[in-house]
Image (cartoon, rainbow, N blue to C red):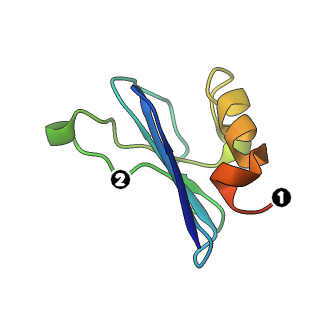
Amino acid sequence: MNNSFKDSSLDVSYNADSDILYVLIRGREIATSGEVSPGVIIDFGSEADGFDVVGLELHKASDQLQPLLQALIDRKEVYGRTT
């Protein structure tokens, strides 16, 4: 199951098969962890399409981004399931 949400600055989708929430963020730089583990939030954007490329775990997300991502995860229609 895949679910997605888009607005002018975010493109968020969830892939239930891999249990990964993909978050593409337009025009922002975010400090990230170099670690990648199951459940990681990954942005596969590129400079060509105007997105920053980031990979971060939710608990290590910036204070600014973490509440937004948690709100998206909590929204059943976006995430595809409840946590």
Q: Position of residue 8 (x, y in %)?
A: 39, 26
For mark 2, give the secondary structure. Answer: loop
- Taking the image as shown, residue 17 lies to the left or right of residue 66, namely left
Q: Position of residue 1 (x, y in %)?
A: 59, 74
**Quarter placement of the C terminus:** bottom right
**Which residue is pictured at 31% across the width and 46% down the height?**
45
- Taking the image as shown, residue 52 lies to the left or right of residue 21, namely left
From the viewer's perspective, is residue 82 above or below residue 11?
A: below
From the viewer's perspective, is residue 38 above or below residue 30?
A: below
Along the line of sight, the residue nearer the viewer: 67 or 54:
67
- Work out which residue is located at the far right of the displayed protein and give it: 83
Mark closer to the chain start, 1 or 2 = 2
**Which residue is pictured at 67% across the width and 55% down the height?**
79
Circle 1 packing at 10 Å, graded few (<14), some (14-19), many (20+), is: few
**Which residue is pictured at 68% across the width and 41% down the height?**
72
Label 2 sits on what residue type?
Phe
Residue position marked by numbered label 1 in the rendering: 82
Query: Which mark identifies residue 44?
Result: 2
Callouts 1 and 2 close, C-beta under 8 Å: no
Q: Position of residue 38 (x, y in %)?
A: 64, 68
Report if residue 22 is visible in the image: no
From the viewer's perspective, is residue 36 above or below residue 58?
A: below
Query: Which mark identifies residue 42?
Result: none
- Work out which residue is located at the far left of the displayed protein and give it: 48
Marks 1/2: CA distance? Answer: 24 Å
Label 1 sits on what residue type?
Thr
Report if residue 25 is visible in the image: yes
Q: Position of residue 40 (x, y in %)?
A: 60, 58
